[in-house]
Amino acid sequence: MTARVKICGLTRPQDVEAAVACGADAIGLVFYAPSPRAVDLEQARILAAKVPAFVSATGLFVNPERDYVEAVLDALPLDLLQFHGDESPEFCQSFGRRWIKAVRVREPGQIEQAFADYHQASGLLVDAWDPNRYGGTGQSFNWSLIPESRPLPLILAGGLSSDNVARAIEQVRPWAVDVSGGVEESKGKKDATKLSQFFKEVHRVCKTD
């Protein structure tokens, strides 16, 4: 099997370059001011300019105003939108772009319902539940809540690092994995060594599968 990799919460050009050099399939830019990994439009322009062909630039939003999403889309060449809040399917679909929906998992049946509700998405991202934070918690969740039947590509997030990503891929068999805090030296600043170790583990388990 193959597991694609998205590195999220990038704030520095050198981190984009390091992620791409390791083999990232996508990079994520956070457009949510309360996040310690948030970027403004000027930062995002600099970062997006470092993204080469065949690597997707993803914009992450949490319960945004429509005008804000449109302003970001006008300013940046984003390939994919990621909605990480309580956005409706209609809202997510309304921008005429490919999009994925994140679900903070805390109970059985939640993922199945999200597959049904957000069936027009390009993928469903499953993350850990936290009552106060929309992602970036550094915590994993009970992977046994993830169903075998998946009408959309499933992206696994939540507490991943080089220590557990191989086990996560073997157990969950996701379409892709999404990591932020697990490859950082501090919030918003990636660690080149941790990035390299993470990708080595992904490639190891996928090669031997």
Image: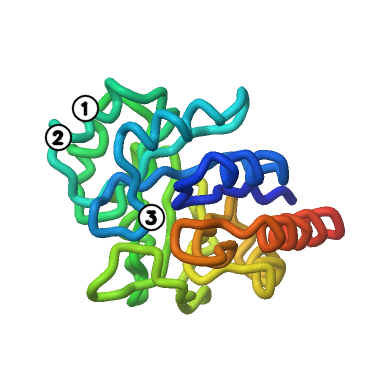
Which of the two discs, 2 and 3, sits closer to the camera? Answer: 3
The residue sitting at 71% across, 67% down in the picture is 166
Q: Secondary structure at mark 2?
A: helix
Tell me if 35 is positioned left or right of 168 in this view.
Answer: left
Estimate the spatial distance between the alpha carbons at disc 2 and disc 1, rounded to whole Å: 6 Å
The amino acid type, in three-letter code, at marker 1 is: Glu
Going from N to C along the chain, the mark reached first, 3 or 1, is 3
The answer to whether mark 2 and mark 1 are in CB contact below 8 A is yes
- Label 2 crowd (10 A; few <14 / some 14-19 / many >=20): few
Q: Secondary structure at mark 3?
A: loop
Q: Position of residue 120 (x, y in %)?
A: 34, 37
- Label 1 crowd (10 A; few <14 / some 14-19 / many >=20): few
Viewer-side residue, 46 vs 57? 46
The residue sitting at 42% across, 65% down in the picture is 127
Estimate the spatial distance between the alpha carbons at disc 3 and disc 1, rounded to whole Å: 21 Å
The answer to whether mark 3 and mark 1 are in CB contact below 8 A is no
The residue beneath circle 1 is 70
Viewer-side residue, 191 vs 172? 191
Residue farthest right in this picture: 208
Which of the two discs, 3 and 1, sits closer to the camera? Answer: 3
Report which quarter residue 99 is drawn in.
Answer: top left
91 in relation to 183, above or below: above
Estimate the spatial distance between the alpha carbons at disc 2 and disc 3, rounded to whole Å: 21 Å
Viewer-side residue, 170 vs 132? 132
Q: Position of residue 117 (x, y in %)?
A: 27, 49
- Label 3 crowd (10 A; few <14 / some 14-19 / many >=20): many
Q: In the rendering, which numbered label is found on residue 60?
A: none
108 in relation to 170, above or below: below
The amino acid type, in three-letter code, at marker 3 is: Arg
The residue beneath circle 2 is 66
Q: In the rendering, which numbered label is found on residue 37?
A: 3
